[in-house]
Image (tube, grey):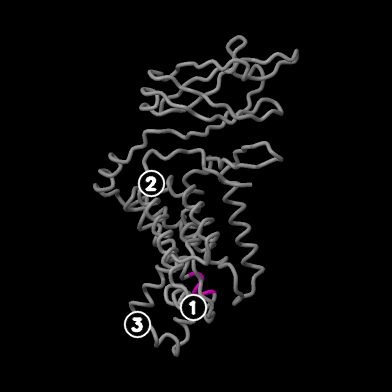
Amino acid sequence: MIPLRDTIQSKNYPIINTSLIAANGLVYLLQVAQGDRLQQFIVTYGLVPARYSVPAIASHFTLAEQTFSLFSFMFVHGGFWHLLGNMWSLYIFGDNVEDRLGPVRYLLFYLLCGFSSGLTHLFLNWHSQLPTVGASGAIAGVMGAYFILYPKSRILTFIPIFFLPYFIEIPAFFFLGLWFLFQFISAAGTPGHGGGIAWWAHIGGFVFGIIFLKLFLFVPELSISRQIRKKTTKRKSHRLQVIKPTSPGTTTDGPRVYQTIVVTPREAQLGTRKLLSLSSGSRKKLLRVTVPPGSRHGTVLRLAGAGQQLQDGTQRDLYLRVAVR
């Protein structure tokens, strides 16, 4: 199962979320360039609890260095796949949270989630000398906020079955709830000072993400955020859209069954092409659909033979109603 995206499109381009992904990528390139000094780099910029709890070790670091590590660790990663997994999760969930909070509040929210996840790990592994790195805790905070903001959203997931592409939408509350439960079970089964994944940092990030979201929603949005929103409004909708199966006779107009394809006002004006994942009975297929220029809200597109199969074996036409949002 490979999560592709959520089904709620953000209204604005996520400039902060994209910048955070880029920053993590740049720091990883800096790591790779360290060569033999990589371990020293990780110890310096990662989060090592013993640096704070053991006076003999803490004496080698200044207060500024100790404080900086509580933030820098969330930009350092243990390897390419560690980086890729974290950034993909941030890409999926971060844009919608930024859309709700605005760029300025979102940046502060992200950093505070990472900081709090680091403190959670620090206090629960007080004497550990193993460095902890990665944006997982901060991203867990983003996921916690998403869990509260968009519980009815769905996560579009790709499941390869033999050579057939299969797409399924999993409810966000189930996806994220199961993820959190897995973190808790893993943390409970891990020795207090064991190495490996910082499960409690994930848990702390998720919980603090919910708390900080509640607090940040009470903070008025800055005027600079509103100005940025005006310049970052999206002009395109999702290229891949899922058409959910409809039982015969539930949404019909005579022999016709209507489904909806979503486009932006600009796409309706200039025309666009979309990729639809269509379920028809036990059949799963992908359709390429062209929305002609000048389409309006409510315009109906007819796809011959692409609809449901009737009992006599004939194939219905599929009628797509254009929704301009």
243 or 21, which lies in front? 21
Predominant secondary structure, magenta span: helix
The image shows residue 105, relative to residue 39, as above or below, that is above
Q: Earlier in the sequence, mark 3 or mark 2?
A: 2
Mark 2 and mark 3 in contact (Cβ < 8 Å)? no
Q: Earlier in the sequence, mark 3 or mark 1?
A: 1
Provide residue 263's location: percent of width, then percent of height: 43, 28
Q: Residues within 10 Å of mark 2 (few under 14, many from 20)?
A: many
Look at the image and give the residue range highlighted in magenta. 120-124
User: Disc 2 designates what residue?
Assistant: 14
- Answer yes or no: is residue 240 visible: yes
Mark 1 and mark 3 in contact (Cβ < 8 Å)? no
On whether residue 194 falls in the magenta region, the answer is: no
Work out how far the residue at label 1 is from the one at label 2, CA to CA, in angstroms.
Answer: 33 Å
Measuring 41% from the left and 25% from the top, which residue is drawn there?
A: 324
The image shows residue 257, relative to residue 146, as above or below, that is above
Work out how far the residue at label 3 is from the one at label 2, CA to CA, in angstroms.
Answer: 35 Å
Work out how far the residue at label 3 is from the one at label 1, CA to CA, in angstroms.
Answer: 15 Å
Q: Earlier in the sequence, mark 1 or mark 2?
A: 2
User: Disc 3 designates what residue?
Assistant: 62
Q: Residues within 10 Å of mark 1 (few under 14, many from 20)?
A: many
Measuring 62% from the left and 57% from the top, which residue is drawn there?
A: 181
Disc 2 marks a residue whose amino acid type is: Pro
